[in-house]
Amino acid sequence: MTLSFAQSMALALLQGVSELFPVSSLGHSILVPALARWRVDRSDPSFLAFVVALHLGTAIALVLFYRNEWWRIISALWRSIVRGRLSNERDESVGWRLVVATVPVGIIGVIAEKPVRMLFGSAEAAGGFLAINGLVMFLGEYLRRRQYGAERSSRTIAQMPYLQSVAVGFSQAFALLPGISRSGASIVGGLLCDLDHSEAAHYSFLLATPVIGAAALLEIPRLFAPGAHVAAVEATAGAIVAGIAAYLSVAFLTRYFKTKDLGPFGWYCLIFGAICFVLARIGVLS
């Protein structure tokens, strides 16, 4: 792999934090190494294998953080399958909404992966999309205030219509573009479906578990691809660092969104993304 051990751990920390914060982990994994002048070959099988390990660490952290809720949800889904009909049980309702929201992003991800992957090495594209990501969060906040006024919505995840759940699932697919945040897009989608910030973030983080986990599992063959001689120590340490960072991130964000909104993240993405876009346009970043 083209990264040193210190660079690998820094990238693991960056991925673990930015995967759940609405700031785009993919965009930052392009822009930060470019700004730091790291010589990273993103097409190197060893680098791709290392990224797989990081995603596995993040997925495991999410499972651990929501372990009790996931146990209840999976148990409720199984009972509904055995029973052959739906009920009004909260965990069952949440579970089926997670299922229908996960399907579209999975289908789009498989179809669009190869065309979108051509953008992965472009700092200009990552900077531009990151700035757009900030604007999307501002737009989402504005539309929600205009749509529902100052009153906080009382709708919960379990009360969300299934069609809206599918719409939130579709919104995640925009994160295939480097610089667009999966959590940011899904939180905005939840806000526009009459969830408050806390419920929208909760739904986004629950949705992240199967999405990130499935993506990591599908990419596991890269660990054994020809030329993917990723060091076991780096992969293991990176997964642990990313997992710890992701666990602490979701713990912070679940508290943050109880009282605050997407505004600070929108300003960060807009300013940082615009700066990186300009630097890439004038040839400082490549």
Image (tube, rainbow, N blue to C red):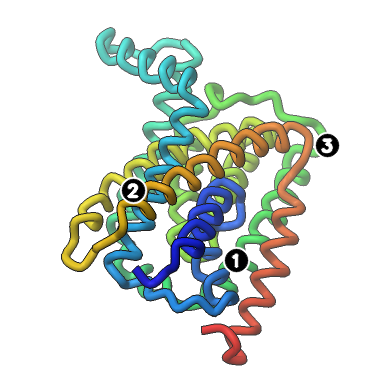
Q: Name the residue under label 3.
A: 150
At label 2, which amino acid type do we have?
Answer: Ala
Name the residue: 73% across, 42% down.
147
Say above or below: 34 vs 62.
below
- Comes first in the chain, label 3 or label 2: 3
Tally of marks: 3
Residue 283 visible, this angle: yes
Quarter of the image for residue 34 reads: bottom right
Residue most extreme to the left: 226
Q: What is the crowding at mark 2: few (fewer than 14 residues within 10 Å), some, or many (at least 20)?
A: some
Q: Which mark is residue 130?
A: 1
Residue most extreme to the bottom: 282
Q: Do the residues labelled 3 and 1 touch (CB within 8 Å)?
A: no
At label 3, which amino acid type do we have?
Answer: Ala
- Comes first in the chain, label 2 or label 1: 1
Q: Mark 2 points at which residue?
A: 215
At label 1, which amino acid type do we have?
Answer: Leu
